[in-house]
Amino acid sequence: MKKTVEEHAARFSEKAAEYDDSKSDEYHACASLVIDYADPDADDVVLDLGAGTGAIALAVAEDAERVLARDISEGMMDEGRRKADERGLANVEFAYGEFREPEVDSDRRIDIVTSNFALHHLADDEKREAIRVMAATGARRIVLGDVAFFEDPDPGAPFYGPEVDDPATVGTLVEAFTAEGFAVTAVERVHDQVAVIVAERGAALADR
Ligand SMILES: C[S@@+](CC[C@H](N)C(=O)[O-])C[C@H]1O[C@@H](n2cnc3c(N)ncnc32)[C@H](O)[C@@H]1O
């Protein structure tokens, strides 16, 4: 049976201290692409969902005005807060937020939404809802890196465990972005089961 939000939070908090040292080459390649595609301007506000220990949030904070990092695991966010302090990054705010309820004030301007290796914990209908919420922030760009299938799922492959993960096909995610009026401007195949998808609003494309 799929885990609840609370069970996911407890599971990640338990392994938060070791999390950063446990990642694969594909994870690092995916995170690096998400950071590159996010590419915030100095006055941009970035919302990073499923932020964990801050791999994306802390990297983009170097260039952005502010980063709102949201996650359900306090243990993971404590690691992120510690690293932000160490790096002297005062423009990153870690706080509780769930994909479908990110706990961001409705009058808060959001320019870019990022998420890396987190959305696959949700079922496909929940992912669509999460993408609706991302779009409703008004962001001009959404950069999603995640476990997602380019081919038929291989249950023996390394990037997911059916008991805790529920990856979508890349096509399902692309359709969810286009259904919200976004143009998908890049799809990067990091691995048969790891994708980076970049979605942009029409107006943002016209401004280029
Ligand atoms: C594999 S970690 C990825 C963390 C970070 N984005 C990174 O790239 O290292 C997945 C994160 O998603 C968070 N998460 C899982 N389900 C979530 C949900 N429904 N809403 C928000 N965050 C969630 C977990 O707490 C965990 O920190």
Image: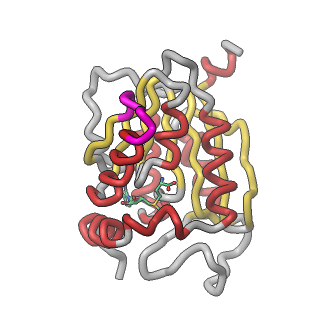
Q: Is residue 192 left or right of residue 43?
A: right
Residue 66 percent coordinates (x, y):
41, 26
Q: Name the residue at 57% across, 47% down.
A: 144
Q: How many marks?
A: 0
Q: Is residue 126 above or below residue 149?
A: above
In the image, residue 193 above or below residue 97:
below
For ligand 1, give the image quadrant: bottom left
Q: Is residue 2 found left or right of 19 in the rendered image? A: left
The answer to whether 192 is drawn above or below residue 83 in the figure is below
Task: Indicate the position of residue 59 as horizontal and vertical percent values.
Answer: 54, 39
Residue at 60%, 73% (x, y): give it: 159
Which residue of the protein is positioned furthest toward the top in this rendering?
207
In this rendering, would 162 be left or right of 29?
left
What stretch of residues is rendered in magenta? 86-92
Please say whether residue 135 is one of the residues in the magenta stretch.
no
Name the one closer to the observer, 172 or 116: 116
Q: Residue at x 60, y 48 (%)?
A: 175
Give percent across and percent down for residue 152: 70, 75
Residue 170 image-quadrant placement: bottom right
Point out residue 206 in the picture as x, y percentages from the top left corner: 68, 15
